[in-house]
Amino acid sequence: MAKTLESFGIPTAHICSIVPISQAVGANRIVPAVAIPYPLGNPELPEDEEIKLRKGIVEKALKALETDIAEQTVFE
Amino acid sequence: MKKIVHYLNQFYGQIGGEEFAGQTPILKEGPIGPGAAIQGLLGEEAEITATIICGDNYFADNQKEAMAVIMKMVEEQAPDMVIAGPGFNAGRYGLACGTVCDAVKKQFGIPVLTALYPENPGAEMFQHDIYIIETPINAAGMRKVLPVMTKFIGRLLNGEEIGFPEEEGYLPQGIRVNVHTVENGAERGVNMLMKKMKGEPYTTELPMPVFDRVPPAPAVKDLKNATIALVTSGGIVPKGNPDHIESANASKFGIYEITGIDNLTGDLFMTVHGGYDPVYATEDPDRVLPLDALRQLEREGAIGKLYNKYYATVGNTTAVKNAKKYAEAIAQDMLQHGVQAAILTSN
């Protein structure tokens, strides 16, 4: 899906738990997530910490969207 | 008798379902589940002496640690061969099957075999390095694939010569071999051309490679004035799943209103994805679709605005060609509504 959206000229940040799968299917802007059942969270953290964690990942995705790239890039 | 070690996930290893996907690698004696069926077909030819079982999430999230333990287990068993799966179209499991087989082949130099659906990301990653028997999309094809696997296991153990992928049932490895033919290249080429012109079927000797990549889209110039849309393959839908999106092999996607919503809560939204433990997403759907974080960033002015609808489907064994079709429709909808960039989340 990430690849198809990009093919329409829509830059797409793929936030995903398993980076090698995202790379294999051909996403261009890849942002690693936390874990499979909670890619953008961590139930062990207090709520405010968890939101901070989530916001940090989304900020990385925004960074990916405003970065011109020549090839598949993982935004750590 | 030759010794085989079999790798399975928590489900086929009969530990449990998604709630046991965090299982660390364990070793059990003898064959289990599909291994027992393979053993039945193998008869006296070889023996599955041990089964290594690891949870899909544990493997995907802790690959290094999982592999260290699994490789030690294999070393201690000193088998003549390692097999894994079949993993069908299960993404995490396919990745594990391919990774284990590839590492065993490289480190111990013994034959390895797994079986996956051609679109499984694990197949794409490893089909050039190891033999992967082609399977149907899901476990309904178990009976069909086990005899093919078993036959292949026997041939690998006996060091027999392996034929072409289409004859043997494994995924093409991209290797060219020299063969002698009666007709020369010019004759064969003209024959193919004649068939093509008559509209008759023919088989090319050199399939064109499929470049499965797209050039990156240009970056968003001015995020502070851009409209961003959220997309997820994690199955987050309004409570009650109004479009009846399937929990696996989804036949559709949905478009859902988020105007005036600052935070996804379990009383209004839910997950219908059948491939991960839903407990955490049910507690707080923002853990899959980060609406609360994007609203904060919208208020802070980091982005112009968040598009007032989001797109959702279930990426659980969903065929690539369907996912592509949904994304094409989503892209057109985005372009019509002035969306300049997207954030796609996947479990």
Image (spheres, rainbow, N blue to C red):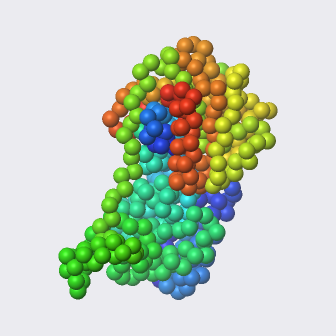
Q: Nearer the viewer, residue B160 or A64?
A: A64
User: Which residue shows up at 54% across the image and 37% down it?
Assistant: B332
Indicate left or right for B4 with B17 as reference.
left
Q: Nearer the viewer, residue B240 or B267?
A: B240
Above-or-below relation of B215 to B180 = above
Residue B25 picture location, percent across and down:
56, 55
Name of the residue lying farthest toward the top: B300
User: Which residue shows up at 43% across the image and 57% down it?
Assistant: B124
User: Which residue shows up at 38% across the image and 70% down it?
Assistant: B110
Above-or-below relation of B190 to B275 = below
Any part of residue B25 in sight: no
Residue B227 picture location, percent across and down:
54, 23
User: Which residue shows up at 51% across the image and 64% down it?
Assistant: B116
Residue B62 picture location, percent across and down:
51, 45
* Residue B292, quarter of the rendered image: top right
Above-or-below relation of B73 to B343 = below
Q: Nearer the viewer, residue B74 or B180?
A: B180
